[in-house]
Amino acid sequence: MTIVELIAQYVLGAKETPINEQELMAELVLAGFETEEINGAFAWMEATALQPQPDTPVDMQMQNLPTYRLYSVPEQQALTTAARGFLVKVRAMGLLSDEAHEEIIDRVLKAETDPVEEKEIKLITIITLLAQSDNLWLREIDCFLENDWDRIYH
């Protein structure tokens, strides 16, 4: 996967110039990868790119199913039960995307403080939502801080 990531970075970096496969191979060999590993990465990328894209109604329905997240032991230790409950509630209401949810948890883990309480997770959630969106979240922010869940539902 490291080789695939390096190839992707190379391709994305070469937007205006043609991709030189020999140069890319030389760079990967210089980075310490074996030729077989590099060829395997290219083969995997090719096989993945050639897979048919799902477009049947069943596939589309599967993409819209809600996701659920289990917290690891370090995450459980970093977040109080109330803080995790808040994240689950906000996620279930559709106010928090999977990406935003992960970003919030990452911020909590990087903070390395005592377990984060519900009040603190609300502030981290607000900051994350505001940073990720051009939308005005003022109503939701008010509701988070005041535990006024009825206003969010209506």
Image (cartoon, rainbow, N blue to C red):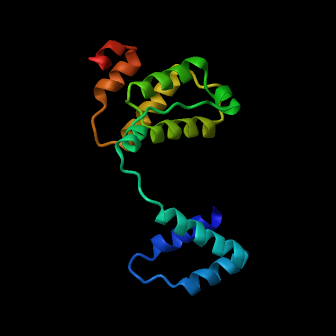
Which quadrant would the C terminus be assigned to in this image?
Answer: top left
Q: Is 113 placed left or right of 133 in the picture?
A: right
Q: Residue at x 47, y 38 (%)?
A: 98
Residue 21 screen position, x and y as percent:
54, 83
Q: In the rendered image of this protein, does residue 63 appear above or below residue 85? A: below
Q: In the rendered image of this protein, does residue 88 appear above or below residue 134? A: above
In front: 75, or 71? 71
Which quadrant would the N terminus be assigned to in this image?
Answer: bottom right
Q: Residue at x 51, y 85 (%)?
A: 20
Residue 126 screen position, x and y as percent:
41, 31
Residue 95 screen position, x and y as percent:
37, 30
Query: Which quadrant holds residue 147?
Result: top left
Whether residue 114 is visible:
no
Q: In the rendered image of this protein, does residue 87 appear above or below residue 52? A: above
Q: In the rendered image of this protein, does residue 79 appear above or below residue 17? A: above
Residue 6 screen position, x and y as percent:
58, 69
Q: Is 25 placed left or right of 144 in the picture?
A: right
Whether residue 75 is visible:
yes
In front: 60, or 13? 60
Q: Residue at x 41, y 33 (%)?
A: 96
Query: Which quadrant holds residue 90?
Result: top left
Q: Residue at x 36, y 47 (%)?
A: 56
Image label count:
0
